[in-house]
C-alpha cells in the first residue's frame, strides 16, 4: 500500500509539472534582443521570451554580438515554437525554442554561443553540449578564460 501511495503521489507530481508547460506554435520573430532573449508575437499578442537553461554573453561582453547574430540566424525563417514553463522576475516567459525540429537553446550551447546557466539549469544533458563546445574551442570557448555572464554582470 505504501508503494502504491508513493507511486500515485509521484505520478501526480509528474502530471502537475507537465501541465505547467505550454507549447505555443508558430510564433513570429519580432526582435532578437541578445543571445538568450527574443521578442515575438502570435495573433497580435506580444511575447518576451527568455531562453531557459542558458545564459548568453551580454551585449557589451566578448561574443555578445556574435551570440545575438547566431540566434538571429537560427530563427531566420521568422517563425518558431516555444515550450513555455513560466515567467521570470522581469515578466519574461521562460521558454525552450524549437525551429524545424531544432532545439535552439541547446544549439546555442553546442556552438559555444552561450553557457549552461548553472543557477537555473534543470536539463543536465546541456553540460554534454557545453563540454563538446569547450573541447572544440567553439565560440566563447575560443578565448582562454571566458567570463560567464553572471560574473560579468556582477563585476559591473
Image: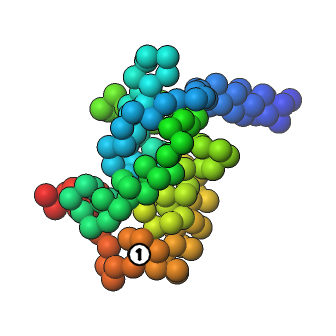
Q: Residue at x 34, y 28 (%)?
A: 91
Rendered residue at 33%/83% (across/down): 144
Q: Answer left or right for 135 relative to 15.
A: left
Asked whether 56 or 125 is in front, the reply is 56
Position of residue 33 measured from the top left corner of the image (x, y, whole percent): 32, 43
Q: In the rendered view, would you say 66 is above or below 84?
A: below
Q: Is residue 102 left or right of residue 57?
A: right
Please indicate, yes or no, whether residue 87 appears anywhere in the rendered image.
no
Spot occupied by residue 48 in the image (x, y as percentages of width and height): 38, 31
Q: Position of residue 117 (x, y in %)?
A: 42, 55
Hey, which residue is sitting farthest top in the picture?
A: 44
SS of the residue under disc 1: helix
Camera-nearest residue between 63 and 19: 63
Above or below, 127 relative to 73: below
Q: Give the residue number, with chain letter if any, for mark 1.
A: 141
- Residue 19's place in the image compared with 97, above or below, is above
Please report the residue visible at 51 percent of the width from the left and 72 percent of the height from the top: 133
Residue at figure coordinates x 43%, y 57% from the top left: 70
Q: Position of residue 72 (x, y in %)?
A: 43, 49
Image quadrant holding the C terminus, namely: bottom left
Q: Would residue 118 be found to the left or right of residue 24 on screen?
A: left
Amino acid at each position: 500500500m505504501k508503494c502504491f501511495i508513493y507511486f500515485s503521489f509521484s505520478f501526480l507530481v509528474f502530471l502537475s509539472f507537465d501541465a505547467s508547460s505550454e507549447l505555443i506554435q508558430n510564433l513570429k520573430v519580432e526582435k532578437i534582443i541578445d543571445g538568450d532573449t527574443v521578442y515575438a508575437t502570435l495573433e497580435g499578442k506580444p511575447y518576451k521570451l527568455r531562453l531557459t537553461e542558458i545564459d548568453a554573453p551580454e551585449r557589451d561582453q566578448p561574443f555578445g554580438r556574435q551570440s545575438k547574430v547566431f540566434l538571429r540566424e537560427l530563427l531566420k525563417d521568422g517563425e518558431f515554437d516555444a515550450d513555455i514553463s513560466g515567467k521570470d522576475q522581469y515578466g519574461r516567459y521562460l521558454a525552450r525554442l524549437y525551429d524545424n525540429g531544432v532545439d535552439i537553446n541547446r544549439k546555442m550551447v553546442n556552438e559555444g554561443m552561450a553557457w549552461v546557466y548553472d543557477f537555473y539549469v534543470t536539463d543536465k544533458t546541456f553540460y554534454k553540449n557545453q563540454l563538446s563546445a569547450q573541447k572544440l574551442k567553439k565560440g566563447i570557448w575560443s578565448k582562454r578564460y571566458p567570463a560567464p555572464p553572471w560574473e560579468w554582470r556582477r563585476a559591473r
